[in-house]
Image (tube, helix red, strand yellow):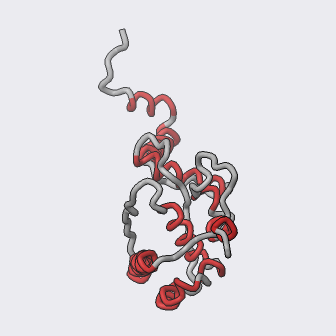
Amino acid sequence: MTLIKELIDIPDRVQKGDFVLRLAEDISRPEVVLGNYVVTPELRSCYDAALSFIGNAVQGRTSKATYLHGSFGSGKSHFMAVLHLILQGNPAARGIPELAPVIQKHNEWLAGKKFLLVPYHMIGAHDMESGILGNYVEFMRRTHPDAPTPPVYVSAAIINQAQGERSNYGDELFFKRLNEGQGSGD
Protein backbone atom coordinates (compact mmCIF):
# COMPACT_ATOMS: atom_id res chain seq x y z
CA MET A 1 0.00 0.00 0.00
CA THR A 2 1.32 3.46 -0.96
CA LEU A 3 1.46 6.02 1.83
CA ILE A 4 0.56 9.69 1.31
CA LYS A 5 4.02 10.75 2.50
CA GLU A 6 5.46 8.81 -0.44
CA LEU A 7 3.33 10.77 -2.91
CA ILE A 8 3.75 14.28 -1.52
CA ASP A 9 6.95 16.04 -0.56
CA ILE A 10 6.21 17.81 2.72
CA PRO A 11 9.04 19.92 4.15
CA ASP A 12 10.05 19.46 7.79
CA ARG A 13 9.83 23.23 8.35
CA VAL A 14 7.97 26.01 6.64
CA GLN A 15 9.10 29.61 6.96
CA LYS A 16 7.06 32.71 6.28
CA GLY A 17 7.24 33.42 2.56
CA ASP A 18 8.39 29.93 1.50
CA PHE A 19 5.49 29.62 -0.93
CA VAL A 20 5.43 33.22 -2.11
CA LEU A 21 6.77 33.91 -5.57
CA ARG A 22 8.91 37.00 -5.58
CA LEU A 23 8.13 38.21 -9.07
CA ALA A 24 10.87 40.81 -9.35
CA GLU A 25 13.55 38.36 -8.16
CA ASP A 26 12.31 34.95 -9.31
CA ILE A 27 11.54 35.92 -12.91
CA SER A 28 15.20 35.42 -13.78
CA ARG A 29 14.91 31.80 -12.62
CA PRO A 30 12.30 30.10 -14.83
CA GLU A 31 12.82 26.75 -13.11
CA VAL A 32 11.58 28.32 -9.84
CA VAL A 33 8.59 29.92 -11.55
CA LEU A 34 7.57 26.84 -13.52
CA GLY A 35 8.73 24.15 -11.07
CA ASN A 36 5.38 23.08 -9.61
CA TYR A 37 3.06 25.30 -11.62
CA VAL A 38 -0.29 23.76 -12.48
CA VAL A 39 -2.45 25.26 -15.21
CA THR A 40 -6.13 24.70 -14.50
CA PRO A 41 -8.85 25.18 -17.14
CA GLU A 42 -9.69 28.54 -15.52
CA LEU A 43 -6.05 29.64 -15.71
CA ARG A 44 -5.91 28.56 -19.36
CA SER A 45 -8.85 30.92 -20.03
CA CYS A 46 -7.09 33.69 -18.11
CA TYR A 47 -3.90 33.28 -20.17
CA ASP A 48 -5.98 33.38 -23.34
CA ALA A 49 -7.69 36.58 -22.16
CA ALA A 50 -4.37 38.18 -21.15
CA LEU A 51 -2.66 37.29 -24.43
CA SER A 52 -5.72 38.48 -26.39
CA PHE A 53 -5.59 41.81 -24.54
CA ILE A 54 -1.86 42.21 -25.24
CA GLY A 55 -2.28 41.01 -28.82
CA ASN A 56 -5.01 43.59 -29.48
CA ALA A 57 -2.74 46.35 -28.18
CA VAL A 58 0.23 45.13 -30.25
CA GLN A 59 -1.76 44.66 -33.44
CA GLY A 60 -3.65 47.93 -32.96
CA ARG A 61 -0.41 49.75 -32.11
CA THR A 62 -2.07 51.26 -29.04
CA SER A 63 -1.22 51.57 -25.38
CA LYS A 64 -3.57 49.80 -23.00
CA ALA A 65 -3.62 49.16 -19.30
CA THR A 66 -5.46 46.71 -17.09
CA TYR A 67 -5.51 45.49 -13.53
CA LEU A 68 -5.00 41.95 -12.31
CA HIS A 69 -7.34 41.52 -9.37
CA GLY A 70 -7.19 38.69 -6.87
CA SER A 71 -7.09 37.95 -3.18
CA PHE A 72 -3.84 37.77 -1.25
CA GLY A 73 -2.17 34.47 -2.07
CA SER A 74 -4.37 33.74 -5.08
CA GLY A 75 -1.43 33.43 -7.48
CA LYS A 76 -1.31 36.84 -9.17
CA SER A 77 2.50 37.04 -9.08
CA HIS A 78 2.84 33.49 -10.35
CA PHE A 79 0.39 34.20 -13.17
CA MET A 80 2.32 37.33 -14.16
CA ALA A 81 5.66 35.50 -13.95
CA VAL A 82 4.47 32.75 -16.31
CA LEU A 83 2.95 35.35 -18.66
CA HIS A 84 6.28 37.21 -18.53
CA LEU A 85 8.13 34.03 -19.55
CA ILE A 86 5.66 33.33 -22.37
CA LEU A 87 6.14 36.85 -23.75
CA GLN A 88 9.92 36.42 -23.50
CA GLY A 89 9.58 33.31 -25.66
CA ASN A 90 10.81 30.98 -22.91
CA PRO A 91 10.55 27.44 -24.37
CA ALA A 92 9.62 25.82 -21.04
CA ALA A 93 6.75 28.26 -20.43
CA ARG A 94 5.57 28.04 -24.03
CA GLY A 95 5.80 24.26 -23.76
CA ILE A 96 3.37 23.85 -20.86
CA PRO A 97 1.02 21.19 -22.30
CA GLU A 98 -2.15 22.72 -20.84
CA LEU A 99 -1.34 26.03 -22.55
CA ALA A 100 -0.59 24.52 -25.98
CA PRO A 101 -3.90 25.60 -27.59
CA VAL A 102 -3.54 29.12 -26.17
CA ILE A 103 0.06 29.47 -27.35
CA GLN A 104 -0.86 28.12 -30.77
CA LYS A 105 -3.77 30.59 -31.04
CA HIS A 106 -1.48 33.56 -30.31
CA ASN A 107 1.70 32.33 -32.00
CA GLU A 108 1.25 34.38 -35.16
CA TRP A 109 1.33 37.79 -33.48
CA LEU A 110 3.82 36.68 -30.78
CA ALA A 111 6.40 35.47 -33.29
CA GLY A 112 9.45 37.71 -33.43
CA LYS A 113 8.07 40.31 -31.02
CA LYS A 114 10.32 41.77 -28.34
CA PHE A 115 8.65 43.10 -25.23
CA LEU A 116 10.09 45.35 -22.56
CA LEU A 117 8.91 43.48 -19.49
CA VAL A 118 9.33 45.39 -16.24
CA PRO A 119 8.76 43.15 -13.20
CA TYR A 120 8.03 45.03 -9.98
CA HIS A 121 5.54 45.16 -7.14
CA MET A 122 3.78 47.95 -5.32
CA ILE A 123 4.78 46.85 -1.82
CA GLY A 124 6.20 49.85 0.00
CA ALA A 125 5.30 52.28 -2.79
CA HIS A 126 4.44 55.77 -1.53
CA ASP A 127 1.85 56.28 -4.28
CA MET A 128 0.88 54.95 -7.71
CA GLU A 129 3.19 57.35 -9.58
CA SER A 130 6.30 56.46 -7.62
CA GLY A 131 5.37 52.77 -7.59
CA ILE A 132 4.85 52.49 -11.33
CA LEU A 133 7.08 55.18 -12.79
CA GLY A 134 9.77 54.93 -10.12
CA ASN A 135 10.09 51.17 -10.56
CA TYR A 136 10.19 51.62 -14.34
CA VAL A 137 12.98 54.21 -14.09
CA GLU A 138 14.91 51.99 -11.64
CA PHE A 139 14.51 48.96 -13.93
CA MET A 140 15.79 50.94 -16.92
CA ARG A 141 18.77 52.25 -14.96
CA ARG A 142 19.64 48.73 -13.83
CA THR A 143 19.18 46.99 -17.19
CA HIS A 144 20.22 49.81 -19.55
CA PRO A 145 22.72 51.95 -17.58
CA ASP A 146 23.90 53.87 -20.66
CA ALA A 147 20.39 54.95 -21.69
CA PRO A 148 19.07 58.36 -20.62
CA THR A 149 16.58 58.44 -17.75
CA PRO A 150 13.10 57.91 -19.19
CA PRO A 151 11.24 61.24 -19.29
CA VAL A 152 8.26 60.06 -17.27
CA TYR A 153 8.11 62.70 -14.58
CA VAL A 154 6.41 66.06 -15.22
CA SER A 155 9.14 67.72 -13.19
CA ALA A 156 11.77 66.38 -15.60
CA ALA A 157 10.28 68.45 -18.45
CA ILE A 158 10.17 71.55 -16.24
CA ILE A 159 13.80 71.09 -15.20
CA ASN A 160 14.88 70.57 -18.83
CA GLN A 161 13.03 73.73 -19.85
CA ALA A 162 14.63 75.69 -16.98
CA GLN A 163 18.10 74.46 -17.94
CA GLY A 164 17.49 75.57 -21.53
CA GLU A 165 16.27 79.00 -20.46
CA ARG A 166 19.19 79.43 -18.06
CA SER A 167 21.69 78.69 -20.82
CA ASN A 168 19.84 81.04 -23.23
CA TYR A 169 19.39 83.98 -20.82
CA GLY A 170 22.44 83.56 -18.58
CA ASP A 171 22.34 83.27 -14.81
CA GLU A 172 21.49 86.87 -13.92
CA LEU A 173 18.50 87.28 -16.26
CA PHE A 174 17.30 83.71 -15.65
CA PHE A 175 17.15 84.15 -11.87
CA LYS A 176 15.68 87.65 -12.21
CA ARG A 177 12.84 86.26 -14.33
CA LEU A 178 12.45 83.28 -12.02
CA ASN A 179 12.06 85.55 -8.99
CA GLU A 180 9.67 88.07 -10.58
CA GLY A 181 6.66 88.64 -8.39
CA GLN A 182 8.42 87.44 -5.25
CA GLY A 183 8.67 89.62 -2.15
CA SER A 184 11.80 91.57 -1.33
CA GLY A 185 12.85 88.99 1.24
CA ASP A 186 12.99 91.57 4.07
Could you tell me residue 182's position as x and y percent?
32, 22
Is 136 situated above or below 168? below
> In this rendering, would 23 be left or right of 68?
right
Could you tell me residue 169's position as x and y percent?
47, 38
Q: Residue 172: in sight, yes or no?
A: yes
**Quarter occupied by residue 145:** bottom right
How many marks can you see? 0
The residue lying furthest to the top in this view is: 186
Q: Residue 168: in sight, yes or no?
A: no
Q: Residue at x 57, y 76 (%)?
A: 86
Q: Residue at x 63, y 68 (%)?
A: 4
Quadrant that contains the C terminus: top left
Is 174 situated above or below 60? above
Q: Residue at x 56, y 71 (%)?
A: 82
Could you tell me residue 18's position as x and y percent?
62, 52
Quadrant that contains the N terminus: bottom right
The residue lying furthest to the front in this view is: 1
Could you tell me residue 181's position as x and y percent?
30, 25
7 or 23, which lies in front?
7
132 or 24, which lies in front?
24
Q: Residue at x 69, y 52 (%)?
A: 12
